Image: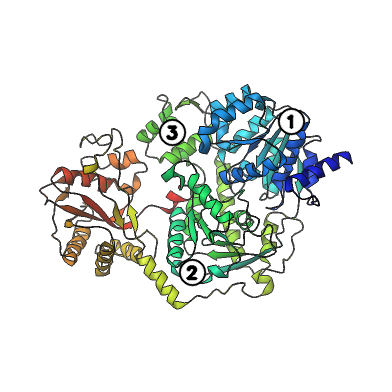
Amino acid sequence: MEAHLRRLTLLRQALDDSKAEFRPGQEDAVQAVFTPPFRAVVVQATGWGKSMVYFLATRMLRDQGKGPTLVISPLLSLMRDQLRAASRLGLKAAHYTSGNEEDWPAVEADLKKGVTDLLLISPERLASDSFRDLIASSSLAKVGLVVIDEAHCISDWGHDFRPDYQRLGAMIRKLPPTTSVLATTATANSRVVEDIQAQIGPATKTLRGSLARKSLRLQVVAGLDVAERLAWLSDHLDDLPGSGIIYTLTIRDAERVARWLQSRGHAVLAYHARLGETRGGDEERVEREDLLLKNDVKALVSTVALGMGFDKPDLGFVVHYQSPGNLVAYYQQIGRAGRAIDDAVAVLFMANEDADIHRWFVENARPHEAGVRAVLDTLENGPRSIARLANALNLTRREIERILTTLSVTTPSPVVKVGRDWQRTLVLYTQDVEREKRLKERRSLERAKFEDFAKTGKCLMMVVREELDDPSAEPCGRCANCLNAEILPSTFDPDTLQSALLFLRRSEVPIQPRKLWPAKALTKYGFTGKIPDQNRCREGLCLSLWGDPGVARWVREDKLRGHYRDELVDAAVEAIRRSPFDNLGWICAVPSLRSLTAVPNFVRRLASALGLPFADAVSKIKETEPQKKQLNSFHQAANLDGAFAVGDCPPGTALLVDDLVDSGWTFAIIGALLVEAGAGAVIPLALCSSRSRGDDDE
């Protein structure tokens, strides 16, 4: 009884509510930290209060003189919310991530003094030699509780597997058996729970609760194309309760949907993992999260970067502009809404492009064997940094990093990192072909189940809960299927649709100039180091994105037949006249040896329409592999070394035109050559970007 009263007192203190009571299962989860086998997996609905369990346990452990709590958590939004909540219990909490490196000395000093109660880290920290040294030399050496938050990430059978999480198994096996370990998740079926148990201890308790979300009303809308979904969002965004999240699968879609809704007068902002790249750290993401938390925007249009752990109890809606890959991810995302309100809405669009995007995700969920072998073979010749590996191998830097991470978490590992370099060890590498095959089949099956879910006549919430092995799953009585009626109309104003179609036609994106030549990639041209300002292309313009309707569809069709229609000339003229381009002096085309006439013919017609002279100033003197096959900057640039020659060209600003743009290196190289030959500034123009959707999936 005394222990119960102590736990209840702390709960009420944390919530600042003298009448608060534990939610069903919460107190049992706290108690599991203090009783053998000191290992527990907690599977509870989002919003149930899993973080409160380890806050209370930490306070009690620290009061007993035990060491600090170490929380491994995958996303920074989770960490920021938890740091605010921990302070209510008087816990001194800190986080140690790539986003706050300036704070590391102070955090390390506090850990060595033993005054830190709770430290939150991302799983990637576990790969750092310096962090492992910090564990050994600070109060973390006698850690009191290890929390694996969003523990489904530890399982490669889970919907959001992260290789760095697999370091946890080895770490936990080294802990004393009386050190408590708590794994928490809202999205683990029985198979994933078994995998978590296998990694943190065979005697692990499982504490599972109901996954019902009684406040949520679910609806599925199928069959709408891009323009129709944009029209629906514009017409119905204000009909959705409160503020919320609109999920997209890619960064480019998040940016575009946000631009569209902003143009229609809606208070929305885009949110994705690349926001911090422009201003450093995660400052811009934090600002946008805060705007949503304060209801100062109607919605954030976001990739999965705004996901696990984002805590806004009054979030009123979640809209999926495109569908997630499986039902578990879907439950995770709709669970952001309706935590502390009686009514919230989740609308799912089944988009035409979903199948292609998810097929790419399934095929690229794990490193390909050929890439793994190439990395290992290269390391056989000596240590290499990631940059040197990228120069040697035609693989993206992200793929190289992923391969090395995946290899490094295996025990024993065939690679080891020493300083900045990766080295081959004596451990032989053997691919588990059957396991890889089963995982791919599993993900394909999960996607098929999701597509069946979108067509079902059963209760939508019940189907989701059954997929998560919730034994208490039952009809919710609130979804569109239970009510046999739409929660929101699936219709939209035809005039709004026309505006959306015009927006898509005019949905140009900038072509950012390259600023630095890849080292040793362009030896024939002698280009190296920083690209001088005068030789650098100005910001250019791309009319469309591959796979879109309108202009992109015309480009796709016309490229196959070798002639670009006059409507594309008209679209280019419109875009140029709306652009800030000024004082254009002349136009030239990017040449090709595969298609000799398509682009020059188009550019001549464009020049005539603009009343500008066409100059045949650039020739291609060497056949090259398609740029699309070159997977990193070094190879993209090196593939074009010595491929182009520039003759006499007029003075003045040149408009350099190509049909497709991918890496931007073709424009960068020809632009520099044109300036050296006497041209003024060079402005790139492309009809379509051919970057794959998989290039920006966060």
Image depth: mark 3 or mark 1 in front:
1
Q: Is residue 459 left or right of residue 231?
A: right
Instruction: Name which of mark 3 and mark 1 comes first in the sequence.
Output: 1
Residue in the foreground of this view, choosing between 520 and 110: 110
Mark 2 secondary-structure assignment: helix
In this orientation, does residue 325 appear? Answer: no
Mark number displayed over residue 179: 1
For the residues bearing labels 1 and 2, Cβ distance under 8 angstroms: no
Circle 3 residues within 10 Å: few <14, some 14–19, many ≥20: many
In this orientation, does residue 465 appear? Answer: yes
- 139 shown above or below 530: above
Instruction: Name which of mark 1 and mark 2 comes first in the sequence.
Output: 1
Q: Residue at left 59%, top 72%?
A: 488
Residue in the foreground of this view, choosing between 596 and 135: 135
- Which residue is disc 2 drawn over? 234
Circle 1 residues within 10 Å: few <14, some 14–19, many ≥20: many
- Which residue is disc 3 drawn over? 375
Instruction: Name which of mark 3 and mark 2 comes first in the sequence.
Output: 2
- Most distant residue in the bottom direction: 494
Gap between marks 3 and 2 measured at Cα: 48 Å
- 314 shown above or below 58: below
